[in-house]
Image (tube, helix red, strand yellow):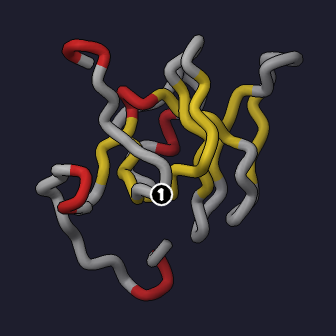
Protein backbone atom coordinates (compact mmCIF):
# COMPACT_ATOMS: atom_id res chain seq x y z
CA UNK A 1 0.00 0.00 0.00
CA UNK A 2 1.23 3.50 -0.73
CA UNK A 3 2.55 5.32 2.30
CA UNK A 4 1.93 2.31 4.53
CA UNK A 5 -1.84 2.85 4.58
CA UNK A 6 -4.08 -0.18 4.91
CA UNK A 7 -7.11 -1.02 2.83
CA UNK A 8 -9.15 -2.54 5.65
CA UNK A 9 -10.19 -1.67 9.14
CA UNK A 10 -11.65 -3.80 11.92
CA UNK A 11 -15.30 -4.57 11.21
CA UNK A 12 -15.11 -4.14 7.42
CA UNK A 13 -16.61 -6.59 4.98
CA UNK A 14 -14.20 -7.28 2.16
CA UNK A 15 -13.79 -9.31 -1.00
CA UNK A 16 -10.76 -11.56 -1.20
CA UNK A 17 -9.15 -10.40 -4.46
CA UNK A 18 -5.95 -12.48 -4.29
CA UNK A 19 -4.43 -15.12 -2.04
CA UNK A 20 -1.40 -17.31 -1.55
CA UNK A 21 -0.70 -20.20 -3.90
CA UNK A 22 -2.76 -23.12 -2.62
CA UNK A 23 -5.50 -20.83 -1.29
CA UNK A 24 -6.64 -19.18 -4.51
CA UNK A 25 -10.03 -20.84 -4.13
CA UNK A 26 -10.74 -18.06 -1.61
CA UNK A 27 -10.73 -15.38 -4.32
CA UNK A 28 -14.17 -13.80 -4.64
CA UNK A 29 -15.38 -14.78 -1.19
CA UNK A 30 -16.66 -12.15 1.22
CA UNK A 31 -15.14 -12.01 4.68
CA UNK A 32 -15.51 -9.96 7.83
CA UNK A 33 -12.32 -8.33 9.07
CA UNK A 34 -11.93 -9.15 12.75
CA UNK A 35 -10.13 -7.47 15.61
CA UNK A 36 -6.54 -8.55 15.12
CA UNK A 37 -3.94 -7.22 12.66
CA UNK A 38 -0.42 -8.65 12.53
CA UNK A 39 1.91 -5.78 11.61
CA UNK A 40 4.88 -8.07 10.93
CA UNK A 41 3.01 -10.01 8.20
CA UNK A 42 0.45 -7.39 7.13
CA UNK A 43 -2.39 -9.86 7.70
CA UNK A 44 -5.85 -9.53 9.21
CA UNK A 45 -7.70 -12.25 11.07
CA UNK A 46 -10.87 -12.79 9.04
CA UNK A 47 -14.00 -14.92 9.14
CA UNK A 48 -16.24 -16.06 6.32
CA UNK A 49 -19.79 -16.67 7.53
CA UNK A 50 -21.10 -18.59 4.51
CA UNK A 51 -18.24 -20.69 3.16
CA UNK A 52 -15.02 -22.48 4.12
CA UNK A 53 -11.72 -20.62 3.77
CA UNK A 54 -8.53 -22.36 2.70
CA UNK A 55 -5.56 -21.50 4.91
CA UNK A 56 -1.95 -22.63 5.16
CA UNK A 57 -1.20 -23.81 8.70
CA UNK A 58 1.77 -21.82 10.03
CA UNK A 59 3.53 -24.71 11.76
CA UNK A 60 2.89 -27.57 9.32
CA UNK A 61 2.66 -25.53 6.09
CA UNK A 62 -0.27 -27.75 5.07
CA UNK A 63 -3.59 -26.57 3.71
CA UNK A 64 -6.39 -26.59 6.24
CA UNK A 65 -9.92 -25.23 6.07
CA UNK A 66 -11.57 -22.75 8.42
CA UNK A 67 -15.22 -23.69 8.71
CA UNK A 68 -17.88 -20.99 8.20
CA UNK A 69 -17.90 -18.70 11.24
CA UNK A 70 -14.42 -19.80 12.40
CA UNK A 71 -12.07 -16.84 12.82
CA UNK A 72 -8.78 -18.67 12.48
CA UNK A 73 -7.79 -17.57 8.98
CA UNK A 74 -5.32 -14.75 8.29
CA UNK A 75 -5.24 -12.88 4.97
CA UNK A 76 -2.96 -10.08 3.82
CA UNK A 77 -4.49 -6.61 3.82
CA UNK A 78 -3.26 -6.24 0.21
CA UNK A 79 -5.41 -9.24 -0.78
CA UNK A 80 -8.62 -7.68 0.57
CA UNK A 81 -10.90 -5.12 -1.09
CA UNK A 82 -13.27 -3.45 1.39
CA UNK A 83 -16.96 -3.34 0.53
CA UNK A 84 -18.80 -0.01 0.80
CA UNK A 85 -18.21 1.57 4.17
CA UNK A 86 -18.49 5.33 3.67
CA UNK A 87 -17.00 5.95 7.12
CA UNK A 88 -13.78 4.35 5.89
CA UNK A 89 -13.77 6.05 2.49
CA UNK A 90 -14.68 2.95 0.47
CA UNK A 91 -16.72 3.47 -2.63
CA UNK A 92 -17.55 -0.13 -3.51
CA UNK A 93 -20.96 -1.29 -2.37
CA UNK A 94 -22.85 -4.45 -3.16
CA UNK A 95 -26.10 -6.03 -2.16
CA UNK A 96 -25.37 -9.52 -0.87
CA UNK A 97 -27.94 -12.29 -0.98
CA UNK A 98 -29.29 -12.89 2.51
CA UNK A 99 -27.36 -16.17 2.76
CA UNK A 100 -24.07 -14.29 2.21
CA UNK A 101 -24.66 -11.30 4.47
CA UNK A 102 -21.99 -10.90 7.15
Q: Position of residue 9 (x, y in %)?
A: 41, 45
Determine whether the residue tagged by mark 1 lies in a helix, strand or loop. Answer: loop
**As drawn, 55 above or below 98:** above
Residue at the right extreme, as displayed: 60
Q: Residue furthest front?
A: 87
Residue sitting at x 25%, y 61%: 85
74 versus 14 height, above or below: above
Quadrant of the snapshot with the N terminus: top left
Q: Residue furthest bottom?
A: 98
Q: Is residue 54 above or below residue 4?
A: below
Left or right: where does residue 102 sit relative to residue 80?
Answer: right
Image check: 12 left or right of 42?
Answer: left
Residue indicated by mark 1: 11
Residue at (58%, 51%) from the top-left corner?
34
Q: Judge the density around disc 1: few (<14), some (14-19), many (≥20) Cα neighbours within 10 Å.
A: few
| Residue displayed at 28% across by 58% down | 83
Q: Residue at x 30, y 44 (%)?
A: 81
Q: Position of residue 88 (x, y in %)?
A: 25, 51
Q: Is residue 41 above or below residue 25?
A: above
Amino acid sequence: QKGGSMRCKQGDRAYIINDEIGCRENIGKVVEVLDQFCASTGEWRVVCHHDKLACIHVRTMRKVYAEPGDGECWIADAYLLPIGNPDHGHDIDVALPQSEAV
